[in-house]
Image (cartoon, helix red, strand yellow):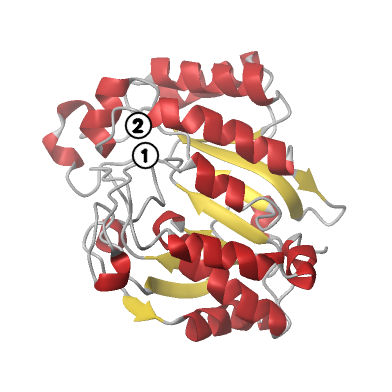
């Protein structure tokens, strides 16, 4: 495997992209909120991210999708804070309560290299949206010190199309969530009514850059798009709309992980319809929908 960012590093363009992204911190437009706060002066927007990247953990992860985990695990770096406010978040201590540590680019680059040394198959950036400039700055340092693993961009799906375009040739594997289709539900459960309208062109751009997921003879993902959809109680209509969009507008060969592990976390107990775990029959119906649209890659059964 050869990480795609190596070509940009050799040409000097990786450094140029890092500077372009860092310039966005002055009047922050890293995500669709476009808060325009000056993060270089300590101002914080809806994501609450500061000037330095904040991380909560760094470790090989064996609970990700099999093509990412392989034998030695996916090298995950969990970033603190989030530009979405999902009231059912399972990692709410990280995303909502901001449990983490500020790190400079040199330290972040060292974490990337330590994961490579441990034998991980990739560098999995978990919730990277609001720290993209800091990540790419660290990536350039790490590449100069020998990093060559594929980059996984593991995000919530609420992304700036302009920023995703700046990641063309840097990210090997995009792994966005596809959460909701109905604006009222998205507003209620994650704080943004335009979630699906923002998500659709972002998914198309991610696919344009990397294509469908490519898995080598060893079963390890090398490049491509992997989409996660968490099935929510009573929301099969959203599931249908999301899967239909993927099959008809991206490709029926898209690797979609239809996930059935929803359980109420954080503030979900306050919302009646999501205050219980997903019924298995709803998950079965979601799988049937995926199969009906030809989206069989990534299904567990």
Which residue is drawn at the image coordinates 56% and 19% (left, top)? 245
In the displayed structure, 246 sits above or below 261; it is: above
The answer to whether one can see residue 300 in this image is no
* Category of crowding for the residue at label 1, using alpha-carbon neighbours closer than 10 angstroms: few (below 14), some (14–19), many (at least 20): some
The answer to whether one can see residue 37 in this image is yes
Nearest the eye: 175 or 60: 175
Percent x, y of residue 298: 65, 37
Image quadrant occupied by the N terminus: bottom right
Percent x, y of residue 32: 37, 41
Mark 1–mark 2 contact, CB under 8 Å? yes
Which residue is drawn at the image coordinates 42% and 22% (left, top)? 282
Instruction: Give the structural element (helix, strand or loop) at label 2.
Output: loop
Label 1 to label 2, Cα distance in Å? 6 Å
In the displayed structure, 1 sits above or below 266; it is: below
In the rendered structure, find residue 278 and report the number of the disc placed on it: 2
Percent x, y of residue 71: 71, 66
Q: Which residue is mark 1?
A: 262
In the displayed structure, 188 sits above or below 248; it is: below
Nearest the eye: 2 or 179: 2
In the rendered structure, find residue 106 and report the number of the disc placed on it: none
Q: Is residue 22 left or right of residue 276?
A: right
Occupied quadrant, residue 5: bottom right
Which residue is drawn at the image coordinates 53% and 57% (left, top)? 63
């Amino acid at each position: 495997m050869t990480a795609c960012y190596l070509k940009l590093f050799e040409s000097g363009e990786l450094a140029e992209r890092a500077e372009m992204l860092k310039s966005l911190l002055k009047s922050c437009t890293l995500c669709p909120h476009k808060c325009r706060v000056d993060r270089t002066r300590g101002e914080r927007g809806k994501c609450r991210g500061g000037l330095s990247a904040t991380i909560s953990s760094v470790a090989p992860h064996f609970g990700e999708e099999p093509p990412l985990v392989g034998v030695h695990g996916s090298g995950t770096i969990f970033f603190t804070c989030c530009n979405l406010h999902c009231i059912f978040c399972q990692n709410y201590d990280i995303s909502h309560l901001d449990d983490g540590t500020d790190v400079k680019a040199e330290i972040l680059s060292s974490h990337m290299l330590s994961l490579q040394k441990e034998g991980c198959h990739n560098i999995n950036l978990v919730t990277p949206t609001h720290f993209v400039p800091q990540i790419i700055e660290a990536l350039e340092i790490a590449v100069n010190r020998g990093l060559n693993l594929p980059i996984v961009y593991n995000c919530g799906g609420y992304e700036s199309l302009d920023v995703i375009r700046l990641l063309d040739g840097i990210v090997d594997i995009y792994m966005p969530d596809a959460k909701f289709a109905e604006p009222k539900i998205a507003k209620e459960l994650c704080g943004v009514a335009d979630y699906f309208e923002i998500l659709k062109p972002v998914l198309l751009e991610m696919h344009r850059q990397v294509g469908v997921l490519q898995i080598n003879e060893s079963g390890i993902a090398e490049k491509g798009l992997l989409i996660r959809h968490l099935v929510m109680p009573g929301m099969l209509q959203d599931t249908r709309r999301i899967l239909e969009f993927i099959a008809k507008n991206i490709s029926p060969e898209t690797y979609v992980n239809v996930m059935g592990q929803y359980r109420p976390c954080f503030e979900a107990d306050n919302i009646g319809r999501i205050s219980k775990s997903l019924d298995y029959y709803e998950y079965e119906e979601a799988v049937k929908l995926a199969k009906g649209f030809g989206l069989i890659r990534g299904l567990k059964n």
